[in-house]
Each structure stands twice: as structure tokens, then as C-alpha cells.
Amino acid sequence: MIAAPFEYYAPESVSEALKLLTTHEDSRVLAGGQSLIPMMKLRLSRPSHLIDLGHIAELNYIAETNGSVRIGAMSTHNQIETSETLRQKCPLLAETAGRIGDVQVRNLGTIGGSLSHADPAADYPAALQALRAQVRLVSAKGDRTISIDQFLVDAFTTALEPGEILYEVIVAADTPGLGSAYLKQQQPASGFAVVGVAAQLEAKGGNIAVARVGITGLSSRSYRAKAVESALEGKAATAATLAAAAKLAAQGEEPLSDVYAGADYRAHVVQVATRRALEAALARAK
Ligand SMILES: Cc1cc2nc3c(=O)[nH]c(=O)nc-3n(C[C@H](O)[C@H](O)[C@H](O)COP(=O)(O)OP(=O)(O)OC[C@H]3O[C@@H](n4cnc5c(N)ncnc54)[C@H](O)[C@@H]3O)c2cc1C
């Protein structure tokens, strides 16, 4: 399949890209092309102006400052997986990136592209919701920073306004005592999550002091499993506590049903995956 005709632009700065975005009404930014190019080839997306962010060096960095790690939108999954800064300061994100697709997808796909595409089975959203991440969005009018929960609105829908670009993702560097894990049951051909669970725990004096859980793939958008978090915090850090909390993983959600997995199966698997992710996170916290 061949994409509909389009004009191609390769700006070298964010300000140049934003100018192009506001000048050309029917325009789209291109990052790693792992989702957009197939959609263009299938003619599900037909932008007349394509603005390639791949030549903008200022969007590609992973840097720690004042207890936060900032990740430029054009950082690839591979860069995130192998970043020493992230492995030390935010291992949950590095581990999650390493579970995305295959090596070719990880070499080209970017965190900005993945989040902006907002596939309900994408891996990053679960980890970033568990990490309480923020995203910085820029446009010709200025910039704003919002929480990842506000950014992810629904399947394939984000809070990005026309003319806006996702500039960076901001996560807090882990404090000592935190343990985390990302666990997914994956669709064997694509690697996308049937269900993916990101967990971060801290145990103090035999009790769970901090519990953060994000879940992807189960329903139409990833979510923070607040019922699981509340069933853990302040309770004894035992296998029984984790197992009981994991049973609440699908609470309030409407599990999806598709050719890979029915709703009942997803609702069951998410409980198992949550228990295992919590056990792994607690073992690492210790
Ligand atoms: C075979 C295969 C397997 C995959 N398996 C997985 C998997 O297991 N888990 C998973 O999570 N993902 C998976 N993916 C998706 C992959 O992670 C893509 O990298 C991701 O969905 C899109 O990132 P990209 O950089 O390629 O963005 P693109 O395809 O270039 O863009 C995607 C969308 O985001 C917009 N966009 C891109 N960057 C920005 C920005 N900075 N600001 C605003 N808008 C922007 C584009 O305009 C477009 O609408 C898979 C993809 C393939 C092809």
C-alpha cells in the first residue's frame, strides 16, 4: 500500500517545527514512524504535510536534574531501555521500554510517539501512571505541564491540542527503598500487551508504605489501579496482602474482548499479572 501524497519537512528546531504546524492546517508530526507510517499506508491517516521531528537534536536526551529525570520526546525505546541514568534512577521505565515490540521497533519508536498515539495496549502508559509522571507540551502559544493521567484521555485520544507537540516526559528519580517491576502477558505476534502491569512498592517496618500500580491492555485506556493501591498501603507486606489486593485489579473497568483474548480471560489474567508484578516489586524493594 502506498500513502496518499504529502509534503515532507525536516525542521532542525522545535520553534521551526511549531511554525510549520501552525502554517499548514492539515499537518502531522512524524517521530519513529512505527504507528503513523502504517496508518498512512493504509490511508487511515492522510496528512498533506508531514513534519519530521527526527532532525531535532533538542528533543533527544535523558537527563537527571534536582531529583527528576527528564526524557526528550524523541528518545527511542532502545535509548530508554539502555540508559544508565534510567536504570539507576528509574528502573521501571527502562524495564518497560525493553518489553516493547522487537528490536527494530525499539530502535525507531519513540516515547513521544508512543504516548501521542495512545494505543490502549501500549506499555509506557502503565509505567508512567505508576510513576506519577508529568508531560510537557509546547506550542507556538507557550508551554504547559500536565500529569500523565490528564494527558491520556482515552483510546487513541490525548490532551494534545492542534499545533501542540509533546516535548518531554518528567519522572521523579527513585528514592532508596523503592522496588518496581513491569510484567506483561503479550500478544505473540506484535508483542502488544494483552494485559501489562507496572508496580512500584516500598516496605517499611514490615508494612507497605508506598504502593503504585498502573495497568494497560485491559480496557480502553491504561489506568491507575487505585483500589489495589489502597488495599496495600499501610498493610503487612505479606504474600496474602499482595494476593488479596491483586484481586481488585480490574475493579471499575470494562475489560476489552478481541480476537486475542475475551473479556473474562483478560479480567482473570490481570489479577494474576498484578499479583506477580507486586511480588517482584516487593522482592526488589527488599
Ligand atoms: C510490529 C510492532 C510491534 C509493536 N509492539 C509494541 C509493543 O509491544 N508495545 C508498545 O507499547 N508499542 C508497540 N508498538 C508501537 C511502537 O511502540 C511505536 O513506536 C509507537 O506506537 C509510536 O511511536 P513512533 O515514535 O514510531 O511514532 P510515530 O508513528 O511517528 O507517530 C505516532 C503518532 O504520534 C504523533 N507524534 C509523534 N511524536 C509526537 C510528539 N513528540 N508530539 C506530538 N505528537 C507526536 C504522530 O503525529 C502520530 O500521530 C509496536 C509497533 C510495531 C510496528
Image: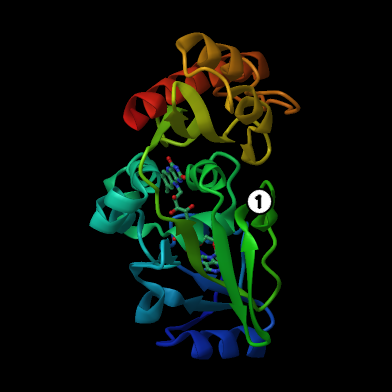
105 or 268, nearer to the observer: 268
Question: Dot 1 lies on which element?
Answer: helix
68 or 26, nearer to the observer: 68
- Does 193 sit left or right of 150 as displayed? left
Q: Residue furthest top?
A: 240
Mark 1 surroundings within 10 Å by alpha-carbon count, few (fewer than 14), some (14 through 19), many (20 or more): some
Given the image, on which type of amino acid does mark 1 rest? Asp
Which residue does the image show at 55% across and 39% down from the upper left?
Answer: 121
103 or 91, nearer to the observer: 91
At which x and y percent is residue 247?
Answer: 62, 15
Q: How many marks?
A: 1
At which x and y percent is residue 236?
Answer: 52, 17
Which residue does the image show at 34% across and 47% down from the upper left?
Answer: 94
- Does 83 sit left or right of 114 as displayed? left
- Does 199 sit left or right of 65 as displayed? right
To which residue does mark 1 refer?
149
37 or 188, nearer to the observer: 188
